[in-house]
Image (cartoon, rainbow, N blue to C red):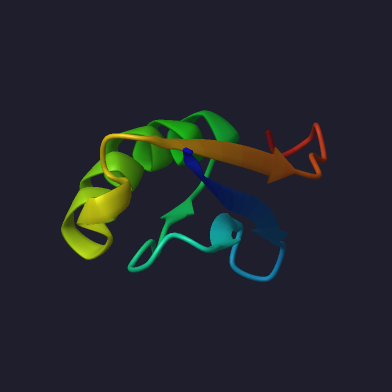
Amino acid sequence: MAKQYHVEAVWDAQVGVYFAKGNIPGLNVEAATMAEFIEIVRDLAPELIAANEPEHAAAHSVRLEADLDLAHA
């Protein structure tokens, strides 16, 4: 069965970036836009899962959740 991972994009208004919270070991992401955040997570998540939890590298899913303030998306 595929392991399910999740990433939450949280907006930090003080510094003007989205940052990641979730259960992918080693995933530390900050991005100024949601598009940039998604691109970084898409690139890094499979690599980090393969490096840190190789038993799940072939079968996993990643769910991204975010509360968007459209002024910052």
Q: Position of residue 36 (x, y in %)?
A: 44, 35
Quadrant including the C terminus: top right
Front residue of 21/53: it is 53
Residue drawn at 82 percent across, 40 percent down: 69
Residue toward you, 2 or 28: 2
Where, by quadrant of the figure, is residue 30 drawn?
Answer: bottom left
Please determine whether, in this image, residue 73 is positioned above or below residue 57: above
Rendering quarter of residue 72: top right
Q: In the rendered image of this protein, does residue 62 appear above or below residue 30?
A: above
Looking at the image, which is closer to me, 1 or 54? 1
Locate residue 56 relative to residue 67 in the image: left or right.
left
Camera-nearest residue between 8 and 30: 8
Residue drawn at (51%, 28%), measured in percent from left and top? 35
Position of 29 relative to 15 (above/below) = above
Q: Residue placed at 59% from the left, 67% from the top?
A: 15
In the displayed structure, does residue 5 sit left or right of residue 68? Answer: left
Q: Residue furthest front?
A: 1
Q: How many numbered markers are drawn?
A: 0
* 29 relative to 19 in the view: left or right: left
**Residue 64: x and y, percent?**
62, 39
